[in-house]
C-alpha cells in the first residue's frame, strides 16, 4: 500500500509582494510543510481563524493591515506557533513589539537567502524563551 506522507507542519505566509511570497513558499515547498499564502491582512486573518498553524510569516506593511496584528492573533490561537516578522524597516521599536507578541525572528528585507534558509532549518530547535533573532542582509 502506497501512502503519501502527510505534511507535519502548517505554515502561513502573509506577504503582499508576490515575488517574496513565492520565494518563501519555495523555501517551505517540501513534504514536511503545508504552505498557505495570503496577500492581505484580511485574507490572513480568515486563514488564522479557520485553521491552526505551526509557523506564521507576516509582513508588517500590508495594504490593509499591520502584520503585527496577525502575529497577535496567531499567538493567541496557538501560543506554541513560531512567528517570523518580515519588514523593510530596520526599526528597534518594531523589533521590540514583535518580540512582545511572541515573534521568534525579525527579518529585514531584502532577504539574505542562504541565512534565511538556514534559520528556517533551525527554528524548530530554538528555545521558547530565547531572545528574538534579527536577520539583516
Image (tube, grey):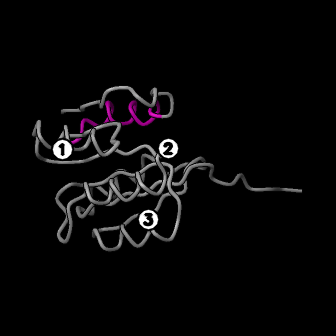
State the predominant SS element of the stretch in magenta. helix
What's the magenta region? 109-123
Near mark 3 (Cα within 10 A), the count class, few <14, some 14-19 or many ≥20, is some
Residue drawn 80% across the image and 56% down it: 3
Near mark 1 (Cα within 10 A), the count class, few <14, some 14-19 or many ≥20, is some
Mark toward the start of the polypeptide (2 vs 1):
2
Coordinates of residue 129 in the picture (x, y in percent): 40, 28
Residue drawn 17% across the image and 69% down it: 63
Q: Mark 3: which secondary structure? A: helix
Q: Tell me whether circle 2 and circle 1 mark residues in contact (CB < 8 Å).
A: no
Near mark 2 (Cα within 10 A), the count class, few <14, some 14-19 or many ≥20, is some
Coordinates of residue 92 in the picture (x, y in percent): 11, 36
Disc 2 from disc 3: Cα separation? 14 Å
Q: Mark 2: which secondary structure? A: loop
Residue 6 left/right relative to 61: right
Which of these two is toward me, 108 or 69?
69
Mark toward the start of the polypeptide (3 vs 1):
3
Q: Is residue 86 above or below residue 122?
A: below
Quarter containing the C terminus: top left
| Residue matched to label 3 | 48
Disc 2 from disc 1: Cα separation? 25 Å
Disc 3 from disc 1: Cα separation? 24 Å
Q: Is residue 83 above or below residue 4?
A: above
Residue 109, numbered circle: 1
Q: Is residue 132 above or below residue 44?
A: above
Mark toward the start of the polypeptide (2 vs 3):
3
Q: Mark 1: which secondary structure? A: loop
| Residue matched to label 2 | 80
Residue 120: in magenta span = yes
Coordinates of residue 79 in the picture (x, y in percent): 46, 47
Residue 132: in magenta span = no
Amino acid at each position: 500500500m502506497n501512502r503519501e506522507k502527510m505534511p507535519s507542519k502548517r505554515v502561513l505566509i502573509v506577504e503582499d509582494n508576490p515575488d517574496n511570497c513565492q520565494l518563501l513558499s519555495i523555501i517551505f515547498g517540501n513534504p514536511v510543510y503545508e504552505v498557505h499564502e495570503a496577500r492581505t491582512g484580511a485574507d490572513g486573518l480568515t486563514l488564522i481563524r479557520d485553521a491552526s498553524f505551526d509557523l506564521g510569516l507576516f509582513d508588517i506593511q500590508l495594504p490593509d493591515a499591520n502584520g503585527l496584528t496577525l502575529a497577535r492573533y496567531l499567538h493567541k490561537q496557538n501560543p506554541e506557533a513560531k512567528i517570523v516578522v518580515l519588514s523593510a524597516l530596520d526599526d528597534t521599536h518594531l523589533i521590540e513589539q514583535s518580540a512582545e507578541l511572541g515573534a521568534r525572528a525579525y527579518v529585514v528585507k531584502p532577504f539574505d537567502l542562504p541565512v534565511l534558509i538556514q534559520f528556517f532549518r533551525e527554528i524548530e530547535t530554538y528555545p521558547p524563551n530565547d531572545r528574538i533573532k534579527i536577520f539583516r542582509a
